[in-house]
Image (tube, rainbow, N blue to C red):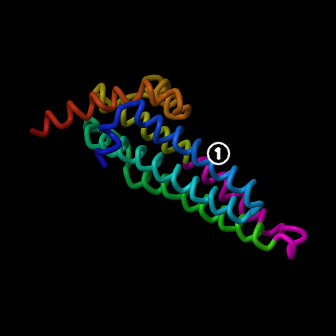
Amino acid sequence: MHTFLRLKHWQLFILFYAIPFILYIIIVVATIVSQNLTGLTVGMIFLVLYSFGTFGSWMYAVAKMSYDMRPQGSDMRLARFQMALIIPAFYFALLFLILFYFISNLPDISVPNPFLLLLIIPFHFLSIFCMFYTMYFVAKTLKSAEVQYPVHFSDYFVDFILVWFLPVGIWFLQPRINALLARYTYVQR
């Protein structure tokens, strides 16, 4: 867990954005060369799992460390955050399996089942809500761990935006996380 917290901002940027971009280029070029849509789907599933795995692990590590360091009297619940982190991962995995099924059976399927679309839409909105909740939780616990008092939305609004737009936010958040981790490990000694 502390591995993600100890990384520098540029290392996380490479892990979160440079590696997936290079993998995406490799997958697209390999698909064009082989003309195999199944390979594209499998490659994209791998890419999404990699992205969810790295980003989710970082979010969990930051939230767990910040949650442990938060001041007393905070109303945050870690179990709710964990559930909100798991739901989008399962939803996107299920969505890609459905997409893989449709692509692999493309000549046989004429029109998608409307019941399937009615089933996907509520889960899609639930997944979006869960992703926003995880960003909210990370921003709030991080700020409350830094300042050591219960915070209001105006106190951590900028952190929420930085987590939401992580390609930019990682450059500002990770140095603060590194400092907080150093303070946390120093206090534990």
> Secondary structure under badge 1?
helix
- Identified at 46% across, 28% down, the residue is 159
Quarter-of-image position of residue 116: bottom right
Q: Is residue 60 above or below residue 98?
A: above
Quarter-of-image position of residue 110: bottom right
Q: Position of residue 14 (x, y in %)?
A: 47, 37
The segment highlighted magenta reads: 106-130
Residue placed furthest toward the left: 189
- Judge by depth and name the residue closer to the eye, 176 or 122: 176
- Identified at 20% across, 30% down, the residue is 183
- Judge by depth and name the residue closer to the eye, 80 or 186: 186
Q: How dense is the environment of label 1, judged by Cα within 10 Å: few (below 14), some, or many (20 and up)?
A: few
Q: Is residue 118 above or below residue 163?
A: below
- Identified at 64% across, 63% down, the residue is 42
Residue placed furthest toward the front: 33
Specify whether residue 114 is painted magenta: yes
Q: Is residue 173 above or below residue 136?
A: above
The residue carrying mark 1 is 25
Q: Position of residue 9 (x, y in %)?
A: 40, 30
